[in-house]
Image: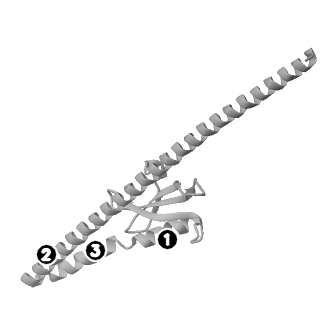
Amino acid sequence: MNIEQQQMEKELDDYYAQLEEDRQKEEEAQAKADAEAEAQAEADRKAEEERLAEEEKKQQEEEEAQAKADEEEAQADSEDEAQTESEPEQEEDTEAIEEEETAEQTVSQEQAIQLVRDQQGISEDSPLLVAYDHVDDSGNYIIHVYENVVDNEETGEGHTATQGWYQVSPSDGSITDVTLDGYQ
């Protein structure tokens, strides 16, 4: 073999060795990226499960609170009826109290949602969702305006993007933007 051939063979061997090394690095990088993607997908799944569990817990708390409120209202009604039967002269007072209670709450949850939709110009076919969230300590409805954002097209997993929080008075329907009050 002449020196030129030996030199070419060495260059070819070096070239193939470099190609193999590059291929191994690429495989390692792909394996690492796959592992990171799987870890992120698992973290996303866990976050979604926690969010759903939190929503379910909130729904259950709301149902329990509504059941308690219904029970208290039924108890108050039966007490009013008992007083009315035992003391007929107080019948007018009971009716006046019931009228006041009705006057205090003239806006329903559904109406509050519609008021926020109207004020913010959110149509029914908008991607923005407008939902009742809870009643605050003052008895006002808290309405959440948000959008569902899909992070993974294959699994449909995603998150919500809050656009705003609005407080609606059940007595007069007045709306206050309370987004900065920490409802996020």
Report, in whole angstroms, how far the alpha carbon at label 1 lies from the one at label 2.
Answer: 35 Å
Query: Callout 2: helix, strand or loop?
Result: helix
Which residue position is annotated with label 1?
Answer: 114
Q: Nearer the viewer, mark 2 or mark 3?
A: 2
Query: Callout 1: helix, strand or loop?
Result: helix
Q: Is residue 105 visible from the viewing direction of this image?
A: yes
Which residue position is annotated with label 2?
Answer: 79
Location of the N terminus (image quadrant) = top right
Q: Residue furthest left?
A: 86
Residue 137 lies left or right of residue 8; in this view the side is left
Query: Dots 2 and 3: beta carbons under 8 Å?
Result: no
For the residue marked with disc 1, what is the amino acid?
A: Gln
Instruction: Give how far across and how far down residue 12 sits, in percent.
Output: 83, 26
Report which quarter residue 132 is drawn in. bottom left
Which residue position is annotated with label 3?
Answer: 100
Residue at the image point whose x is 51% and y is 43% from the top: 39
Report which quarter residue 156 is drawn in. bottom right
Quick one: 120 or 47, which is closer to the camera?
Answer: 47
Report, in whole angstroms, how far the alpha carbon at label 3 lies from the one at label 1.
Answer: 24 Å
For the residue marked with disc 3, what is the amino acid?
A: Glu
Query: Callout 3: helix, strand or loop?
Result: helix
